[in-house]
Image (cartoon, rainbow, N blue to C red):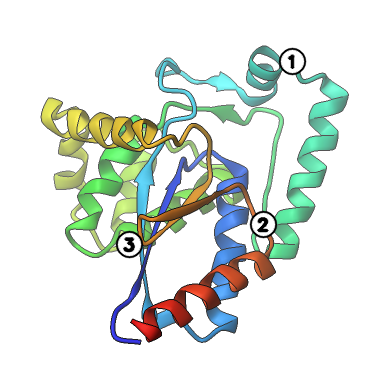
Amino acid sequence: MTNKIKIDIVSDVVCPWCIIGYKHLEQAISELDLTNKIDIEWQPFELNPDMPPEGENLRAHSARKYGTTPEGSIKARANITEQARKAGFEFAYYDDMKMVNTRAVHVLLEYAKQYNKQHDLKMRLFKAFFSDQRDISDQNVLHSILEEVGLDAQKALEQIDNPQKIKEVVNIESMWQQMGISSVPTVVFNRTSAVNGAHPVETFKQILTELVEEQMIR
């Protein structure tokens, strides 16, 4: 195998199935001993691009957007939490948890890419939002997270008010949407094929095995 498998993961950091799906993919990569043969790049997708800066209570958001009942919300959270636990990730839902606007976060993820810190930052953001009950729309929280992954937090945060950087993220989002991606997570392999949703480990192993065999033949 002479070249790496390129994997683009189109996702939002407030999407629970995105981190569950990634953990399944991560396990598949590890079990196939492909860690050094995979190039992962995270691509932006905003679940709620029109979300106001103050955000919205998560239960109220689910009820408004999806028609979820309080009972349905409790059941859904329990199911997602269990799915995450099985995948090796902790969810810590709480009553005051809110859905937030994530455009600034995606700007930061694009910035982190040039320092090879994008993946580390993505993982920290998932953990901050779902496990640590931190408000990732708060710049003080973001400042701390950026420092945790070894980035210049002040310089990074300057990017989120830069119209050009915002436009770049919106353009990337539009590009993926024009390619037919309308929900997340979507995992794209070598920019030639894709699967949508948090697929099981075995599904990812099958896909990766086929790609390895194909690239070895070439």
Query: Which amino acid does the dot numbered 3 rest on?
Result: Val
Mark on residue 153?
none
Q: Secondary structure at mark 1?
A: loop
Q: Which residue is mark 3?
A: 149
- Residue visible at 39% across and 42% down in the picture: 141
Q: Which residue is mark 1?
A: 67
Of the two numbered discs 3 and 2 on the same chain, state the one appearing first in sequence: 2
Whether residues under marks 3 and 2 lie with C-beta atoms below 8 angstroms apart, the answer is no
- Residue nearest the viewer, comparing 51 with 158: 51
Query: Which amino acid does the dot numbered 2 rest on?
Result: Glu
- Residue visible at 20% across and 48% down in the picture: 111
| Foreground label between 2 and 1 | 1
Badge 2: residue crowd in 10 Å (few <14, some 14–19, many ≥20): some
Residue 121 in the image: state x and y as whole percent. Answer: 36, 56
Badge 1: residue crowd in 10 Å (few <14, some 14–19, many ≥20): few
Q: Is residue 217 above or below residue 195?
A: below
Examine the image and state in which quarter residue 65 appears.
top right
Query: Which amino acid does the dot numbered 1 rest on?
Result: Gly
Examine the image and state in which quarter residue 171 appears.
top left
Examine the image and state in which quarter residue 25 appears.
bottom right
Q: Which residue is mark 2?
A: 90
Residue 213 in the image: state x and y as whole percent. Answer: 47, 82
Separation (CA) of disc 2 from disc 1: 26 Å
Badge 3: residue crowd in 10 Å (few <14, some 14–19, many ≥20): some
Q: Secondary structure at mark 2?
A: loop
Separation (CA) of disc 3 from disc 2: 20 Å
Residue 7 in the image: state x and y as whole percent. Answer: 40, 61
- Direction from residue 28 to residue 147 in the image, left or right: left
- Direction from residue 71 to residue 176 in the image, left or right: left
| Foreground label between 3 and 1 | 1
Q: Secondary structure at mark 3?
A: loop
